[in-house]
């Protein structure tokens, strides 16, 4: 089950995701600087880098929540950045989970999870409900299906948010610092779930500040600096023998802060 | 919570306050003539029930209630449409947005009574087949809808704007279209939030149905006026006023309850 190796051992012909020379600015602030990255099917990559290096922006561009200025992004070989592409069609194939959970507060846990399948995939309520029950079982929250989000702990909310994204059967999952808003004691339950997902086989791009998690879970770690990936490699290499001075500096700061 | 002593003090102070107030009013010069003109029990009762020559204020009030209910239904829908149109992005929709903005600016600025005059007296004179042959009540309701929808559209818009954009991002990221996100995620939350201010506007609307009397419709205020002109006694106005107050109190209390519930819920949300 475990995708023990980098891209070449994975099935399928091309990469699941290819980001090609993407630029993105907010006003005069250039955030993505011609970034390129490929993700093989079932590969798990972690994006690390200082705050403001462009991790969230990259994930938002991949999900078309932000338009790119130039460059292209391919999902399963299809360019999703050409004009005229059906953004809703693209987004249903790419799940994203945000730092702040962003559950719908007026809907129960079950309704949160079934909204996408029902309205976008046109699933019947019993189909969607069945799939939701499966997911709730998997995240260990079957007994909370009728609760509203504000009655759940942060960790539970984030697990529901993951289930909500998974309910769409996405080909790729994007996770954006999904434990940064959690109390330390709740981080493990969420990371555990992501780890299970990775072991079960899921293409994922994960922006994280949790270096221990990145080391344990990622097939490949990419270090972002000023909108470019300046170093990437297997976690063993990246965390023990980083080549670039910027990477070394960053990791030293992280170690000093006791986060690795 | 008030302690036993506090209750005692507050009761005593209430009794004394009203005794003094009552004495001041009852002993004031002209008190008896005021009572005779405004609070005569016989006139109060007659105005309420109606006479051979003047309509019952109570029955006339039913027209206010009817106008209020019909207008309210239209306002809720029409204002929502205006608010939504105002928020449609994209250059193609610029003219629609512009019309929505112009409409709200215009009708929030023009006094209701002028709209009533223009519709109620102006439109019948146009000789248009359908539009010019409606009843006064219809012109009255149309005026109320035009003016109040402008306010209510702004209330809706404030509610829509108050929903954080991360909610829209979450909806869109599931593949929901812009319209679906609005319908299933933004509007349900926005409308829940604006119910108290919305009800507040409707309390105003209930009262303003009285202005339709300028077109000649015999609603409560007009019925009271007919009675007063006939009997040279203003008790009919007092009874009409009292009925309007009674009409608005349930809505006012209901609004308070919703606000209190909202506050409790928010307080509970913070501690979770
Ligand atoms: N919507 C936006 N409008 C303007 N500037 C933005 C916007 N989103 C991000 N930025 C800017 O882009 C830069 C990169 O932000 P981004 O959120 O991608 O960084 P990040 O690597 O995710 O950082 P963090 O680790 O703090 O989450 C920042 O300087 C930020 O201020
Ligand atoms: Mg970020």
Image (cartoon, coloured by chain):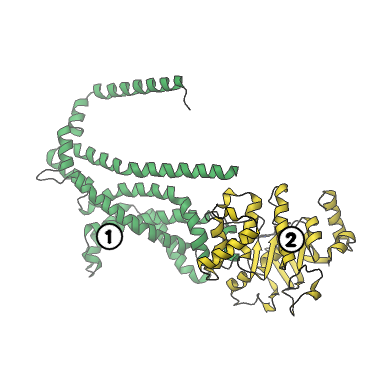
Q: Is A12 rendered above or below residue B64?
A: below
Q: Nearer the viewer, mark 2 or mark 1?
A: 2
Q: Position of residue B132 (x, y in %)?
A: 23, 65
Q: Colour of chain A?
A: yellow
Q: Please say whether residue A184 is visible from this viewpoint.
A: yes
Element under disc 1: helix
Q: Is A20 rendered above or below residue B188?
A: below
Judge from the rendering whether residue A72 lies leftward or rightward of residue B256; answer left or right.
right
Element under disc 2: helix
Q: Which residue is mark 2?
A: A195
Indicate the quadrant containing the N terminus of chain A: top left, top right, bottom left or bottom right. Answer: bottom right
Q: Do discs 2 and 1 share a chain? A: no
Q: Please say whether residue B211 is visible from this viewpoint.
A: no
Q: Position of residue A176 (x, y in %)?
A: 69, 60
Q: Position of residue A63 (x, y in %)?
A: 65, 68
Q: Which residue is mark 1?
A: B119
Q: Residues within 10 Å of mark 1 (few under 14, many from 20)?
A: many
Judge from the rendering whether residue B99 lies leftward or rightward of residue A163; answer left or right.
left
Viewer-proximal residue among B99 and A147 = A147
Q: Chain of mark 2?
A: A
Q: Colour of chain B?
A: green
Residue at image point 31% right, 24% down: B21
């Amino acid at each position: 089950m475990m995708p023990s190796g980098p891209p070449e051992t994975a099935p399928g012909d091309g990469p699941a995701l290819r980001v090609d020379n993407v630029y993105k600015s907010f006003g005069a602030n250039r955030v993505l600087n011609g970034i390129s990255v490929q993700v093989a099917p079932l590969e798990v990559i972690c994006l690390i880098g200082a705050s403001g290096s462009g991790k969230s922006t990259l994930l938002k561009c991949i999900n078309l929540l932000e338009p790119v200025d130039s460059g292209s992004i391919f999902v399963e070989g299809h360019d999703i950045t050409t004009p005229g592409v059906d953004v809703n069609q693209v987004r249903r194939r790419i799940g994203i989970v945000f730092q702040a959970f962003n559950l719908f507060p007026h809907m129960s846990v079950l309704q949160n999870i079934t909204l996408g399948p029902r309205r976008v995939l046109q699933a019947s309520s019993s189909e969607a409900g069945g799939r939701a029950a499966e997911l709730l079982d998997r995240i260990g929250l079957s007994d909370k299906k009728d609760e509203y989000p504000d009655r759940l702990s942060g960790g539970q909310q984030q697990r529901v948010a993951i289930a909500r994204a998974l309910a769409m059967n996405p080909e790729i999952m994007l996770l954006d610092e999904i434990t940064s808003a959690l109390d330390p004691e709740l981080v493990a339950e969420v990371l555990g779930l992501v780890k299970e997902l990775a072991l079960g086989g899921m293409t994922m791009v994960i922006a994280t500040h949790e270096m221990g998690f990145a080391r344990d879970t990622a097939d490949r770690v990419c270090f972002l600096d000023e909108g470019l990936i300046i170093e990437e490699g297997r976690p063993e290499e990246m965390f023990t023998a980083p080549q670039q001075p910027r990477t070394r500096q960053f990791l030293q700061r992280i170690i000093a802060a006791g986060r690795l | 919570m008030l302690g036993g002593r506090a209750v005692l003090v507050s009761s005593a102070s209430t009794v004394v306050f009203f005794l003094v107030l009552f004495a001041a009013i009852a002993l004031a010069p002209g008190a008896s003539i005021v009572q005779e003109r405004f609070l005569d029990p016989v006139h109060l009762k007659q105005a309420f029930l109606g006479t051979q020559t003047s309509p019952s204020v109570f029955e006339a009030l039913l027209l206010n209630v009817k106008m209020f209910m019909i207008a309210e239904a239209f306002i809720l829908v029409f204002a929502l449409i205006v608010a939504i149109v105002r928020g449609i992005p994209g250059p193609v929709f610029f003219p629609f947005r512009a019309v929505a903005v112009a409409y709200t600016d215009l009708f929030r600025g023009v006094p209701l009574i002028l709209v009533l005059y223009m519709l109620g007296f102006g439109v019948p004179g146009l000789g248009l087949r359908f539009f010019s042959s409606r009843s006064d009540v219809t012109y009255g309701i149309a005026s109320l809808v035009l003016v109040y929808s402008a306010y209510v559209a702004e209330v809706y818009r404030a509610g829509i704007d108050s929903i954080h954009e991360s909610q829209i991002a979450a909806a869109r990221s599931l593949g929901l279209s812009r319209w679906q996100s609005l319908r299933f995620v933004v509007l349900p939350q926005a409308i829940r939030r604006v119910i108290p201010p919305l009800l507040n506007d409707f309390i105003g609307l209930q009262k303003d149905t009285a202005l339709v009397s300028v077109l000649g419709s015999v609603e409560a205020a007009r019925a009271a006026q007919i009675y007063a002109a006939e009997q040279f006694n203003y008790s009919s106005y007092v009874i009409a006023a009292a009925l309007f107050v009674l009409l608005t109190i349930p809505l006012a209390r209901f609004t308070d309850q919703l606000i209190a519930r909202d506050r409790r819920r928010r307080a509970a949300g913070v501690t979770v």
